[in-house]
Image (cartoon, grey):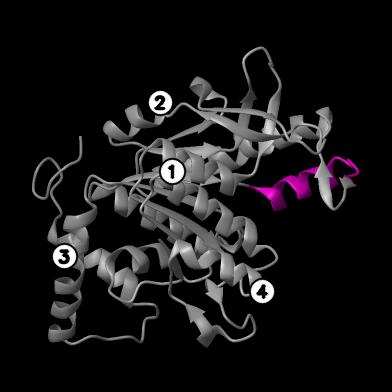
Amino acid sequence: MGHGWGTDKVISVSHLWLINWRIIMQNEENTLTTEQWSNVLVEALPYFKNWVGKVVVVKYGGNAMLNEELKQAVMEDIVLLNTIGIKVVLVHGGGPEINHMLERVGKESKFVDGLRYTDGETMEIVQMVLTGKLNKDIVGILLQKGGRAVGLSGVDSGLLRAKKTEKDLGFVGDVTEVHPEILTSLLDEGFIPVVSTVALGEQGDDARYNINADTAAAKIAVALKAEKFVQLTNVAGILRNIDDPSTLIKRIERTAIGSLKATGIISGGMIPKIDCCETALNGGVPRTHIIDGRVPHSLLIEMFSDRGIGTMIY
């Protein structure tokens, strides 16, 4: 059951101060007058009221995962959202870490039409890195920041079921079922679920599959009836001109996606991210976002300010 403003979650003055400090004080030289601070608080309050008790699914990856300073900022944001009563699920990938481990053990990568082929040995390494290392590293940071986090993979409690992709890429799968009960239980108890995207095979298939983290996050958002699905990326959002950040498109209606693809504005690596947004929207998630994970505290800027950040697809 969703929490109302002023029910079992109380937002203290210190929480308000800390959130707005993070949004605005991007460097130590930035100083605000008392009136400016008041304006910031007044702007943020309606957003707090709106989001308390709602489910937000965040796909975490890219530079925000590789850069230590950005990683710390993201974890602080997640803990803060959880502290004020927003139900956050953090879904993570880990491609670069997997590549690094494969190199360390001398495992040569095989590619099929540019896509990595995941054989049995590689899948063991994928599971070890995603579930055994990265997932626990993230949980550890959240705990150190004062959060209540629990790490799990798509295998746990049968959260994610998958079948092998049509193109034979070995143990790479497409999500066919999401069983979110374990996530719902954790969220209701005030925990932050941290999900690594290793999935269990369908009934009768005891294999494990490596799943695209963006797709998994979108389908988890649908299963949880999330209010918002956010992808942290390495770009500012959808740009009309990829070389000009000032051409950022702040809002896109889902009906415009086809024409933006046809004209090449949405292209390359942005296509699968937009497709995940469409998956979430078609499943009932009202708002999806592609935001710049390279900006410290971009998640808070999106959640609690009028200007927002990145591109909203709705």
Alpha-carbon neighbours of circle 2 within 10 Å: few (<14), some, or many (≥20)? some
Tag in front: 4 or 3 = 4
Q: Pick the quarter of the image with the C terminus.
A: bottom left
Q: Which mark is residue 45?
A: 3
Residue 264 tag number:
4
Instruction: Name the foreground residue: 36 vs 120.
Output: 120
Q: Is residue 191 left or right of residue 132?
A: left
The alpha-carbon separation of the residues under discs 2 and 4 comes to: 40 Å
Which residue is depicted at the point 30% across and 53% down? 81
Secondary structure of the residue carrying tag 1 is loop
Start and end of the magenta stretch?
94-110
Q: Position of residue 2 (x, y in %)?
A: 20, 40
Residue at 27% x, 32% y is 188
Distance between the alpha carbons at the discs numbered 1 and 2: 20 Å
The one of 200 and 28 positioned closer to us in this rendering: 200
Which is more N-terminal, label 2 or label 1?
A: 2
Whether residues under marks 1 and 3 lie with C-beta atoms below 8 angstroms apart, the answer is no
Q: Are marks 4 and 1 in contact (CB under 8 Å)?
A: no
Q: Position of residue 86 (x, y in %)?
A: 28, 48
What residue did someone put label 1 on? 283
Q: Nearer the viewer, residue 209 or 83?
A: 209
